Amino acid sequence: MKLWLHHINVVSHDVEELQNFYSDVLGLRRQTDDIPVRNDGYSAPVAFLSDGSVQMHLAGRDLDLGFRSGNAINPVERGHIAFRTDDLAAFRKLLDDKGISYSDYGGVATDSWHQIFFHDPVGNVIEVHEVKGEIQPGEAGHD
């Protein structure tokens, strides 16, 4: 099982303001091949930026997503850091073996990813996802 940093998610009430800031000040490029976000579970604005290897996802804050999806962890309450894996089943087993609880969002946000979320020891939200279908491990930033 391989695991690599994929994106950092920052939430805000004003996604456009954040997108302009990270583009204009830090030079992150706006993604033109944005991830197809589903609108049935989460309909807040989302923007995707990248430095060429790691992405930054800017999402509208949605305090009720966890309740609507039936999950204990809400990844768009405060944001999260995300890793991609080539074997989500093995990673879930690792969490189970270590007694770490997680929320399995499946494909709630997008049909092309299977996502799980859990907390680190101090309460930060961590995402690990696998692209449905074939991926090349280690290609961070290449979707």
Image: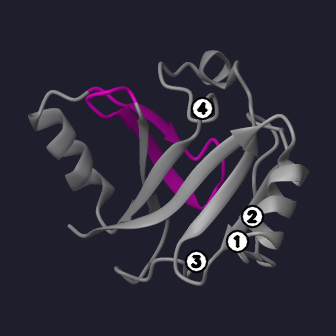
Q: Earlier in the sequence, mark 4 or mark 1?
A: 1
Label 4 vs 2, first from the N-terminus: 2
Looking at the rendered structure, the secondary structure element under dot 3 is loop
Cα–Cα gap, marks 4 and 2: 18 Å
> Which residue is tagged 2?
22
Q: Do the residues labelled 1 and 2 touch (CB within 8 Å)?
A: yes
Callout 2 secondary element: helix
Say which residue appears at 58% left-offset and 47% top-offset: 107
Report which residue position mark 4 lands on. 78
Q: Does the magenta stretch include residue 105?
A: yes
Near mark 1 (Cα within 10 A), the count class, few <14, some 14-19 or many ≥20, is: few
Residue 24 lies left or right of residue 41; in this view the side is: right
| Amino acid of disc 3 | Asp
> Closer to the N terminus: mark 1 or mark 3?
1
Q: What residue type is labelled 1?
A: Leu
Left or right of 67? Residue 7 is left
Residue type indicated by callout 4: Arg
According to the picture, the residue beneath numbered tag 1 turns out to be: 26
Q: Which of marks 2 and 3 is in front?
A: 2
Q: Which span of residues is magenta-colored?
A: 101-123
User: CA–CA distance between discs 2 and 3?
Assistant: 21 Å
Q: Is residue 129 left or right of residue 27?
A: left
* Dots 4, 1 in contact, CB < 8 A: no
Residue to which mark 3 is pinned: 143
Q: How many labels does the image show?
A: 4
Q: Is residue 77 placed above or below 30 in the rendered structure?
A: above
